[in-house]
Image (cartoon, rainbow, N blue to C red):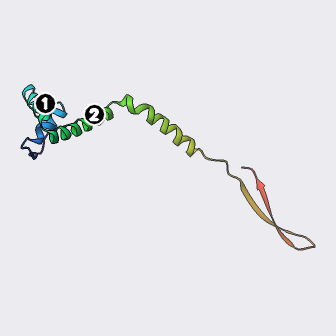
Amino acid sequence: MKHRRTSLPCGFQEDALIAVALDEADAALRQAVHTHIRLCQACCGVFARYCSVQQVLTALQDPRDVAEPLQRAQERLTQRLVRQPAVHCSYYWCSTVLAHDMQAVRRPR
Protein backbone atom coordinates (compact mmCIF):
# COMPACT_ATOMS: atom_id res chain seq x y z
CA MET A 1 0.00 0.00 0.00
CA LYS A 2 1.41 3.35 -1.00
CA HIS A 3 1.27 5.99 1.73
CA ARG A 4 1.74 9.69 1.32
CA ARG A 5 4.87 11.05 2.93
CA THR A 6 3.50 13.76 5.19
CA SER A 7 5.26 15.11 8.22
CA LEU A 8 3.09 16.16 11.10
CA PRO A 9 3.76 19.45 12.98
CA CYS A 10 5.93 17.56 15.48
CA GLY A 11 8.04 16.12 12.65
CA PHE A 12 6.72 12.55 12.96
CA GLN A 13 5.82 10.82 9.69
CA GLU A 14 2.12 10.29 9.13
CA ASP A 15 2.75 7.14 7.08
CA ALA A 16 4.17 5.50 10.22
CA LEU A 17 0.90 6.17 12.06
CA ILE A 18 -1.06 4.78 9.11
CA ALA A 19 1.07 1.65 8.88
CA VAL A 20 0.58 0.86 12.56
CA ALA A 21 -3.15 1.65 12.45
CA LEU A 22 -3.54 -0.70 9.47
CA ASP A 23 -1.44 -3.36 11.20
CA GLU A 24 1.15 -3.24 8.41
CA ALA A 25 4.15 -2.17 10.52
CA ASP A 26 6.96 -4.25 11.92
CA ALA A 27 7.55 -4.48 15.67
CA ALA A 28 10.17 -1.71 15.76
CA LEU A 29 7.94 0.81 13.98
CA ARG A 30 4.97 -0.20 16.12
CA GLN A 31 7.01 0.41 19.26
CA ALA A 32 8.23 3.79 17.96
CA VAL A 33 4.69 4.93 17.13
CA HIS A 34 3.27 3.85 20.48
CA THR A 35 6.10 5.59 22.31
CA HIS A 36 5.57 8.76 20.28
CA ILE A 37 1.78 8.93 20.67
CA ARG A 38 2.14 8.68 24.45
CA LEU A 39 4.08 11.97 24.30
CA CYS A 40 2.43 13.78 21.38
CA GLN A 41 -1.25 14.64 21.76
CA ALA A 42 -1.69 15.73 18.12
CA CYS A 43 -0.34 12.42 16.79
CA CYS A 44 -2.39 10.50 19.32
CA GLY A 45 -5.55 12.06 17.86
CA VAL A 46 -4.48 11.38 14.27
CA PHE A 47 -3.62 7.79 15.17
CA ALA A 48 -6.99 7.32 16.90
CA ARG A 49 -8.79 8.52 13.76
CA TYR A 50 -6.83 6.11 11.56
CA CYS A 51 -7.62 3.27 13.97
CA SER A 52 -11.29 4.22 13.83
CA VAL A 53 -11.27 4.12 10.03
CA GLN A 54 -9.54 0.74 10.14
CA GLN A 55 -12.25 -0.63 12.45
CA VAL A 56 -14.98 0.53 10.07
CA LEU A 57 -13.20 -1.01 7.08
CA THR A 58 -12.74 -4.29 8.96
CA ALA A 59 -16.41 -4.36 9.92
CA LEU A 60 -17.43 -3.75 6.30
CA GLN A 61 -15.36 -6.74 5.18
CA ASP A 62 -17.25 -9.14 7.46
CA PRO A 63 -20.31 -10.28 5.48
CA ARG A 64 -22.01 -11.59 8.64
CA ASP A 65 -22.31 -8.04 9.95
CA VAL A 66 -24.13 -6.77 6.88
CA ALA A 67 -26.07 -9.85 5.78
CA GLU A 68 -28.91 -9.51 8.29
CA PRO A 69 -29.52 -5.75 7.82
CA LEU A 70 -29.40 -6.22 4.05
CA GLN A 71 -31.92 -9.06 4.27
CA ARG A 72 -34.29 -6.88 6.36
CA ALA A 73 -33.89 -3.98 3.94
CA GLN A 74 -34.61 -6.25 0.99
CA GLU A 75 -37.76 -7.59 2.69
CA ARG A 76 -39.02 -4.07 3.42
CA LEU A 77 -38.30 -2.99 -0.15
CA THR A 78 -40.07 -6.04 -1.56
CA GLN A 79 -43.14 -5.27 0.57
CA ARG A 80 -43.19 -1.71 -0.72
CA LEU A 81 -42.86 -2.82 -4.30
CA VAL A 82 -45.78 -5.27 -4.16
CA ARG A 83 -48.22 -4.20 -6.81
CA GLN A 84 -51.49 -2.99 -5.33
CA PRO A 85 -54.67 -4.20 -7.06
CA ALA A 86 -55.91 -1.63 -9.52
CA VAL A 87 -59.53 -0.70 -10.10
CA HIS A 88 -60.30 -0.29 -13.76
CA CYS A 89 -63.20 1.85 -14.90
CA SER A 90 -64.86 2.13 -18.25
CA TYR A 91 -67.31 4.76 -19.38
CA TYR A 92 -70.28 4.54 -21.69
CA TRP A 93 -73.00 6.90 -22.89
CA CYS A 94 -76.52 6.09 -21.98
CA SER A 95 -79.34 8.00 -23.63
CA THR A 96 -82.49 8.47 -21.62
CA VAL A 97 -85.57 10.54 -22.14
CA LEU A 98 -84.29 13.00 -19.56
CA ALA A 99 -80.80 13.63 -20.92
CA HIS A 100 -77.63 12.11 -22.11
CA ASP A 101 -75.75 10.65 -19.17
CA MET A 102 -72.28 9.30 -18.81
CA GLN A 103 -71.97 6.34 -16.46
CA ALA A 104 -68.84 4.96 -14.85
CA VAL A 105 -68.75 1.23 -14.37
CA ARG A 106 -66.21 -0.54 -12.23
CA ARG A 107 -65.12 -3.80 -13.65
CA PRO A 108 -62.79 -6.22 -11.96
CA ARG A 109 -59.67 -7.36 -13.68
Seen in the picture, residue 92 relative to 86 is either above or below; the reply is: below
Q: Amino acid at mark 1?
A: His
**Residue that mark 2 sits on:** 55
Seen in the picture, residue 20 relative to 92 is either above or below; the reply is: above
Where residue 88 sits: x, y (%)?
A: 71, 55
State yes or no: discs 1 and 2 in contact (Cβ < 8 Å). no
> Among all residues in the image, which is located at the extreme top?
27
**Residue that mark 1 sits on:** 34
Eye-nearest disc, 1 or 2: 1
Which residue is at a point 47% across and 34% down the rendered structure image? 71
Where residue 35 sits: x, y (%)?
A: 10, 30
70 relative to 60 in the view: left or right: right
Where residue 59 sits: x, y (%)?
A: 32, 32
Which residue is at a point 56% across and 45% down the rendered structure image? 80
Which residue is at a point 16% across and 39% down the rendered structure image? 41
Seen in the picture, residue 94 relative to 45 is either above or below; the reply is: below
Which residue is at a point 22% across and 37% down the rendered structure image? 48
> Among all residues in the image, which is located at the extreme right?
97
